[in-house]
Amino acid sequence: MEPERAWIIAVLRGEIPPWPGSAEPCSFADQVFRRAEQEGALPLLYHCLRGNQQAIPPALRDRLARRARQEAAADLPREQALRDALAALAGAGTPVLLMKGTPLAYSHYPSPWLRPRCDSDLLLPDRAQAERAWGRLRGLGYQRPRGVSGELASTQYSCALPVKGGGFVLDIHWRLNNHQRFARAFGFEELARAAVAVPALGPPARALGPSHALLLAALHRIGHAAEGGADRLIWIYDLHLLARGLAADQWDELVALAADRGLAKVTLDGLRRSSALFGTALPAGPMEGLQAAAAGEAISLAAFYGRWRLELENWRALGGLRERAGFLREHLFPSADYLLHRYGRRSRLWLPWLYLHRTLRGVWKRLG
């Protein structure tokens, strides 16, 4: 492990590691700052160093403090934008569940700005309601770029609102995950029955319950393995906080859900990684239950670390020839409007070459 990453992890664990004596102070400080930023842990690093900032060089201390102020200031208009969006959707009678990093920022972190988010994820019951939600969001000033459409190639769309300090992005999902292996693991109604309130975001704000939130955090982490993101510190720290907050009955629920949906292996892997990096205390009984359930799952974790193997798992998760044909069609032949916009062309004469380029580029990407 790189020394700057090891140093960051030690701080997040609650330790105050000595500044490496063999490192040139400015160079190592730059490495720490850049790495913490890449790992999504820069504000958290600042927070964990509070009261012990004499342990780091003044230049790094000043950079961390400056960024912390920027993050805290930028978070306020984004929070207001999210509150407004949730209120507008509630006013239209649209059921919404918050998921991933945003609700955790309010429920599990000391301050929401300590959990950086590039977007806020909303889950809606189905695509029809997601499209109706767009009418409300457009009325608030959101802009929606052209994207791949269909039922299988993508199960979400993004829209952005300019706010002070940068843009605010909403990801509107109508299924839990874009990977077919995970997309139907849980239905909206099941998740809604176990949902919890997020008081800081107003009366309409509800989020996944603790057990579902931990399962999704494990799925989100492994879903990025093929692109090298499975060990991103902020995602593993989410798992650490979620696991630390589970009550005994919630651990039992987690094990039962993971076993029933074939998610024990993925969940076990995420929790073990959290324990290895952050010392997460994992109760013996539930871990034994997850291990027993994982032993009966056919899927290999290695599948998530290779693009072709992951695509094969997604393919296997599709039901029947008709759905598989639709999956191929949506991936290989997205709408002409999307393709022209994506490549910055106007004439439809470009379309045959653009479709060919997209196909070859996709093959090359998955081989890489």
Image (cartoon, rainbow, N blue to C red):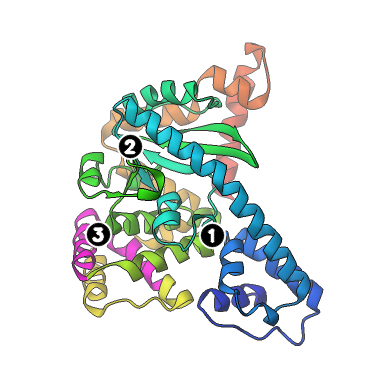
Mark 3: give few (<14), some (14-19) or many (20+) Cα within 10 Å.
many
Judging depth in this view, the residue of 91 and 331 nearest the camera is 91
Q: Is residue 338 left or right of residue 268?
A: right
Disc 1 secondary structure class = helix
Tell me the CA gap for discs 3 and 1: 29 Å
Pointer 3 residue? 258
Q: Position of residue 250 (x, y in %)?
A: 22, 64
Disc 1 versus disc 2: distance between alpha carbons?
Answer: 24 Å
Q: Does residue 153 show up?
A: no
- The answer to whether one can see residue 267 in this image is yes
> Which label's residue is closer to the chain start, 2 or 3?
2
Residue occupied by mark 1: 114
In the rendered structure, which disc, 3 or 1, sits on the residue that comes first in sequence? 1
Residue carrying label 2: 96
Residue type at mark 2?
Answer: Val
71, 39: nearer the viewer: 71
Magenta residues span 248-272
Q: Of the residues tagged 2 and 3, which is closer to the observer?
A: 2
Residue 106 figure quarter: bottom left
Taken as a whole, is the magenta stretch helix, strand or loop?
helix
Q: Residues within 10 Å of mark 1 (few under 14, many from 20)?
A: many
Distance from Cα at disc 2 to Cα at disc 3: 23 Å
- Do the residues bearing badges 3 and 1 touch, measured as CB atoms within 8 Å? no
Q: Is residue 89 magenta?
A: no
Q: Residue at x 41, y 75 (%)?
A: 275
Amino acid residing under circle 3 = Ala
